[in-house]
Image (tube, helix red, strand yellow):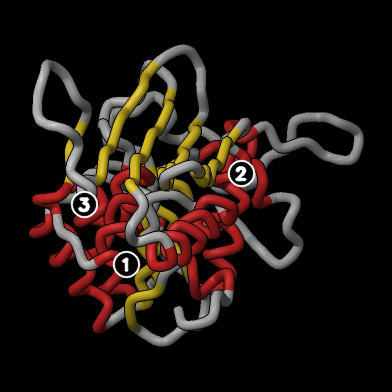
Amino acid sequence: MGRAIMGLAQTHRDLVLGGALERKGSELVGADAGELAGWQDAEGATGRAGVSVSEDPDEALKDVQVAIDFTSPATTLRVAEICAEKKVALLIGTTGFTPVEKAKLLGFADRIPVLLAPNMSLGVNLLFHLTGVAARGLSDFETEITEIHHHHKKDAPSGTAQRLKEVVLENQGRDESNVVYGRSGIGDPRPGDEVGVHALRGGDVVGEHTVFFFGDGERIEITHRATSRSTFASGALAAAKFLAGQKPGVYSMNDVLQIPGS
C-alpha cells in the first residue's frame, strides 16, 4: 500500500510527498521513495522523489500536514502519539484494533484530525452507506455477509467485513450476540435475527465483499469487488486531501464522500 500510495501521489499536482517511514532495520531504509514507487519522468525513466525512506518517525513526519498509516495496531498507536505532538493529521487504514486500542487511538482526536477507515476504497465506503439503508428498510430479511481475499491475508473476517457487520447491527438494533462466524454441524434452524459472517481465502483475490438480504421469494445482494490495490490508494489520497486543514476531531470516509447525515 505504501508503494501504491507514493506512486499515485505523483499524479496529483496538489499533493507533495513529504516523508516515508519503514520499520527499523528494513532493507528499504535510505532508499529513494520515488524509485521504490516506480516514479517515471516524461521520458519514461525512473524518477527520484528526493525523499529517503526513514526508520525515524520524527524525521519522516517533519513538515507534513497529513500522515497516512497502513501498518499494525501497535505501530499505528506510536505514530498517532507523534502526530498528536507535531499536530499532523492522521489517516489510518490499519485494521485489527482491539476496543481498548481503538479508544486510545481516537483519543488523539482532541488534538488532531483523525480518520480511521477499515477500507479506503470510495466504492467500499459507499457500500457501507448502501448496506445501512438496506438494513433499515429490510429489517425482517435475513442477513449474511461474505468476504474473499488472497491467501496471504492474516486476519479473518476482514476489517471491511467487520465494519459491514457493525453497520447491519447498528441499523437493526442488534448486537454481537446475534452474530455467527461460519457454520458447521447440525443445529437448530437459523434464527431470523442472526447475522452470518463468512471468510474465504485463496489465490490472489484483492478483495470482494457481499451483503445478502434474504426474504421470502426474493433477495438483494450488494457486492463490491476490488481488482487493483490502486483503488485503495486513490481513496486514501482523496481522504488525505480532505483531512488537510480540518479541525481536530474524528472523521470518516462518509465525510470525504459528503454523504448526507455523516
Quarter of the image where the C terminus is located = bottom left
Q: Is residue 47 above or below residue 115?
A: above
Compare marks 2 and 3 and give the one earlier in the sequence.
3
Compare marks 1 and 2 and give the one earlier in the sequence.
1
- For disc 2, the neighbor class at 10 Å (few under 14, some 14 to 19, many from 20) is some
Residue under numbered circle 2 = 231
Whether pointer 1 and pointer 2 mark residues with C-beta atoms closer than 8 Å, the reply is: no
Q: Is residue 89 above or below residue 218?
A: below
Choose between 174 and 201: the one closer to the eye: 174
* Residue 251 at x, y percent in the picture: 40, 74
Q: Which label sits on residue 254?
A: none
The amino acid on which the numbered mark 3 sits, given as a three-letter code, is Asp
Residue under numbered circle 1 = 171
Given this view, does label 1 or label 3 mark the residue nearer the observer?
3
State the separation of the CA atoms marked 1 and 3.
13 Å
Q: Which label sits on residue 193?
A: 3
Q: Would you identify the image quadrant in which residue 174 lies?
A: bottom left
* Residue 208 at x, y percent in the picture: 49, 33
Q: Residue furthest top?
A: 203
Left or right relative to 41: residue 59: left
Query: In this view of the protein, can residue 64 be seen by the observer?
Result: no
Q: Is residue 73 above or below residue 261?
A: above
Given this view, does label 2 or label 3 mark the residue nearer the observer?
3
The amino acid on which the numbered mark 2 sits, given as a three-letter code, is Thr
Per the image, label 3 sits on a secondary structure element best described as: loop
Per the image, label 2 sits on a secondary structure element best described as: helix
Given this view, does label 1 or label 2 mark the residue nearer the observer?
1
Choose between 229 and 172: the one closer to the eye: 172
The amino acid on which the numbered mark 1 sits, given as a three-letter code, is Asn
Per the image, label 1 sits on a secondary structure element best described as: helix
Residue at 55 percent of width and 71 percent of height: 256
Residue at 35 percent of width and 71 percent of height: 114
